[in-house]
Image (cartoon, rainbow, N blue to C red):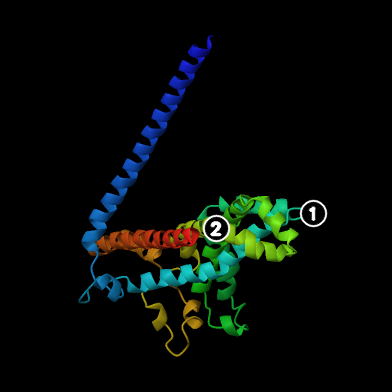
Amino acid sequence: MSVSAHNSQSRFVSGVMYAACVICTVVILSLLVLVTAYLVSIGWQSLHWSFFTQDPIPLGLPGAPGGMRNAVLGTLMLIALASIVGVPMGVLTGIYLSEYQAGAVFTRPVRFVCDVLAGVPSIVVGVLGYALLVAPAAAGWFSHIPVFSEISSFNGWAGALALAFIMIPIIARTTEEMLSLVPSSYREASVALGATKASTIIKVVLPSATASIVTGVMLAIARVAGETAPLLFTALNSDFMPVEINRHFPFIHPLLGQPFPSLTVTAFNYARDIDPDRQKLAWAGILVLIMLVFAVNLSVRLATRRRRKA
């Protein structure tokens, strides 16, 4: 085969593959646009101001079905608590896997465990949370611990820890991959100037990969924000406002010891309800959840872009 014929064949194959990639991209984007448009068209009609200002009202009472103020606040609290636990542990695990490979005995086992846990179905995490946190709490195992003395069975602590358990392997593997992209010359230059390994990681390596790590963290938050199965087995659900469960105690402690509201579980329950008004409210809840995830991702991307430019 001549060189020109070979080049023509290569260009033809390249053009076909390019066209196939474009077609697949258009199909996927079209499906995404259709699903999003359908969700917005239904959810927007049911979205009103009382959605954010009222709690659920039992059917038959004036104003029913009310709103999902308690579920929105509960979801924000669960995500915040899960991030407080999951983000530091995930980032530190990723640092260990990336920066302490030489002579580290646990690097391969930890990486393998992270890969396995990242692919575990969320319902398995929910069952595990029920077995390790909810069932012992119902049996009174935590009653002698002051912080957890008011935990009965299903509770917000278990829900937050279940979500953190999902976040940790995702953040760990993302952090490891992003840190491995930092050039070795950065580390060598820092060590040559007399910096310790810990100082090099904190002042040189991490700042170089901050934007990518934050993106991985936001992907993990977006993943847990839409989870329902783990919360069904741990936090369950509640129709009450989280901050009103126990007024005489500051914000966090006893209120997390009760069944805890969340937007995903509330929308799941309302979608199966026989009342059409609650079904419409479920669509509004799903729309708010997607808007919340979109707003968080957009704000973080804008913040990291400004820092990168600076």
In the rendering, at what x and y percent does residue 23 appear? 36, 33
Amino acid type, label 1: Gly
Locate the N terminus by quadrant: top right
Residue located at (61% from left, 61% from top)? 206
Whether residue 54 appears in this view of the structure is: no
Farthest residue to the front: give it.
Answer: 193
Where residue 268 sits, quadrant-wise, is bottom left
- Label 2, secondary structure: give it: helix
**Label of residue 213 in the image:** 2
Residue located at (31% from left, 51% from top)? 36
Q: Is residue 52 left or right of residue 212?
A: left
Residue located at (44% from left, 58% from top)? 301
What residue would you read off at disc 1? 103
**Label 2 CA crowd tier, 10 Å (few <14, some 14–19, many 20+):** many
Q: How many angstroms separate mark 1 from mark 2 (CA)?
A: 25 Å
In the rendering, at what x and y percent does residue 106 appear? 74, 56
Farthest residue to the bottom: give it.
Answer: 248
* 11 is higher (above) or lower (below) than 301: above
Residue located at (40% from left, 63% from top)? 299
